[in-house]
Amino acid sequence: MNPAGFISDTKATICALATPPGSSAISVIRISGTESFEVCDKIFKPKNKKIKLANIDSHTIHLGDILGKSGIIDEVLVSLFRGPNSYTGEDSIEISCHGSEYIQHRIIELLIDKGIRMAKPGEFTFRAFLNGKFDLSQAEGVADLIASHSKTSHDLALNQMRGNFSDKIKDLRGQLVNFASLIELELDFSEEDVEFANRDDLKKLLKTINKEISSLIKSFSLGNVLKKGIPVAIVGHPNVGKSTLLNVILNEERAIVSEIPGTTRDTIEDTIVINGISFRFIDTAGLRDSDDTLESIGIERTYEQIDKAKIILYVFDVSQTNCDDIEATLTEFKAHINQLPEGISKDKKFILIANKIDMLVEAPKGFKGMVEKECIFVSAKRKENINLIAESLSKYVESEKISDTAIVSNTRHYEALIKTLESIKSTEKGFAEGIPSDLIAIDIRKAIHHLGEITGEITTNEILGNIFSKFCVGK
C-alpha cells in the first residue's frame, strides 16, 4: 500500500492554494509539473499580447486576466519558474489573485478542467525532495518553519532547512562509508590476509563519531523544548500567590485567585513568547500535607509537572518564609529529581520568587541570605518587578547559539541517532573483543543505515508518507 497516496504519481501536474484558505487581500495558487505553462497559457491572457508563457524567461512576473467560459474571473500576476530553478525543481507557476474565496475556487476549477489535479498535503515539498532540492531532514525543516511560533523555534527550523544538521550527518556517514568499503574490500581478499583499513584510524573515528552523536542526542532535550515551548512549572506552598503570578505573566485571568488555601486542584497551562522564546507556564496545586482527596491528586500532579519542567519557579511568601525554609524545600525538590527514572531530564533550573513584598513593613528574616540565593523580589498583586522574571527566563536560553549549532529537535532524528550510537558502541566493543572483521562490518553498516534514514539517503514509502502527509496542502 502506498501510504502517502502520491509517491508513485510524480508525473502529473498539480495545483493547490498556497496561502491560507478564506478571504484575504491576496491569494496565491501554486502549479507544478510539465504541463504548467501549457495549461496556464489556455486560461491566462497577458496585458502584453506578444508574450506566451511557454516561451518566456524564468523568474519573470506578468500582469493579465484569468479567463473563464463566461469572461474575466480576475486580474492577476503570474510568476513563472523554469525547472530545475524552482522550489520543486519542476516547471512551476504561481498565480497571485485577489483573495476572494469565489475567485480562488473558480481558478482552481479551471485548472482541474484543463487536466491538472489537486495536490495532496506536502506534495510540492515531496517533489522538491525527489528532485534533489532538499534532503529529508531539510524537508522536515520546511514543515517546522511553517509551524514556528517564536524566534527560537524559527531559528531551529531555519537552521535545519538550510542543512546545518544534515551536513553534519552526511559528513559522519561519509567517513563511515569510506571505512566500511575498505573493511569489505579486505573480506574479498580474506585468503591473502591483507589490511586496507587502518584499525587505529578506525578506532579514532569511532571515538569521534561516538562523541558527536552523543552530543547531538544530548541536544534533543533542549531542542525539543525550544521547538514546543520551554515548560515552566510554578510551584510553592498554598496561598503564596502562584495563580496571581500566572495571571500577571500571561496578562489575563487564567487561574482562579482566592485567599482560601488549596484553591488550585489541577494544573493550569498557557503559553507566552518572551523576547522571541516560547515558554509554557504551568500553575500547580500548593504543596502541603492534605487529607482532601482532590487536593492530594492535585499535589501529585504538581510533582509530575516538576518532572516535566525545564524551569521551576519556586514562589514563596517573603513575609512568612526564611532561608532555612527555602533550603529545606529545595533539598526536598532536588531529592525527588535525583530519583527520577532514566530518560527524564534532571537538568532543571530553579528560580526563586519572593512574592508579596507589598506586605513587608521591614526587611524579611534572612534577607541577606535570600539576596545571596539570587531571589527575585516581586509583588504579583501590584505587578511589581515582574519584568525581572522575564529577564531571568530569557537569560536561561542562549538563543543566539542556535544559528550556528546543530541542535536536534525532531523525534525521528533523535530515535535514529540513538540506534546509530548503539551500533557505534557495538563496533567499538567488537574491536575490543577482537571479533572478526565481517561481524564488525555488519555493525558499521547498521550505523550507516540509521544515519541515512535521517537525510533520506535510505528510506521507505512508510517513512515518506508519514512525514509529508503532515504538511499543509500547497507546501
Image (spheres, rainbow, N blue to C red):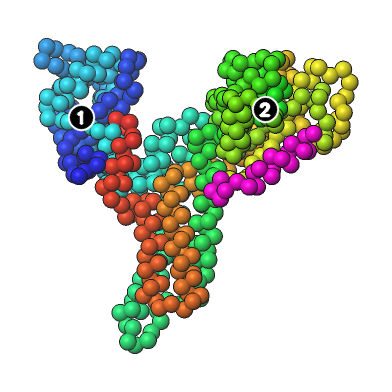
Q: Nearer the viewer, mark 2 or mark 1?
A: 2
**Nearest to the observer: residue 364 or residue 125:** 364
Q: Which residue is mark 2?
A: 290
Is label 2 in a helix, a strand or a loop? loop
Left or right, residue 276 beside residue 412: right
Residue drawn at point x = 62 percent, y = 21 percent: 264
329 part of magenta stretch: yes
Give how far across and how far down residue 419 sits, in percent: 43, 57
**Magenta span of residues:** 325-344
List x then y, in percent, for residue 129.
Answer: 30, 45
Q: Residues within 10 Å of mark 2 (few under 14, many from 20)?
A: few
Residue lying furthest front: 291
Q: Specify whether 22 is left or right of 409.
A: left
Q: Please tell me which residue is depicted at 48% across the width and 74% down the height of the picture.
A: 431
Residue identifier under label 1:
118
Which corner quadrant of the image does residue 193 belong to?
bottom left
Q: In the image shown, does 456 or 73 lie closer to the viewer? A: 456
Residue projecting furthest to the right: 362
Q: Residues within 10 Å of mark 1 (few under 14, many from 20)?
A: many
Is 359 positioned to the left or the right of 435 in the image?
Answer: right
Q: Is residue 328 within the magenta segment? A: yes
Q: Residue 25 is drawn in which quadrant?
A: top left
Q: Measured from the top left, where is residue 470 in percent x and y?
A: 33, 35
Q: Is residue 434 above or below residue 116?
A: below
Q: Earlier in the sequence, mark 2 or mark 1?
A: 1
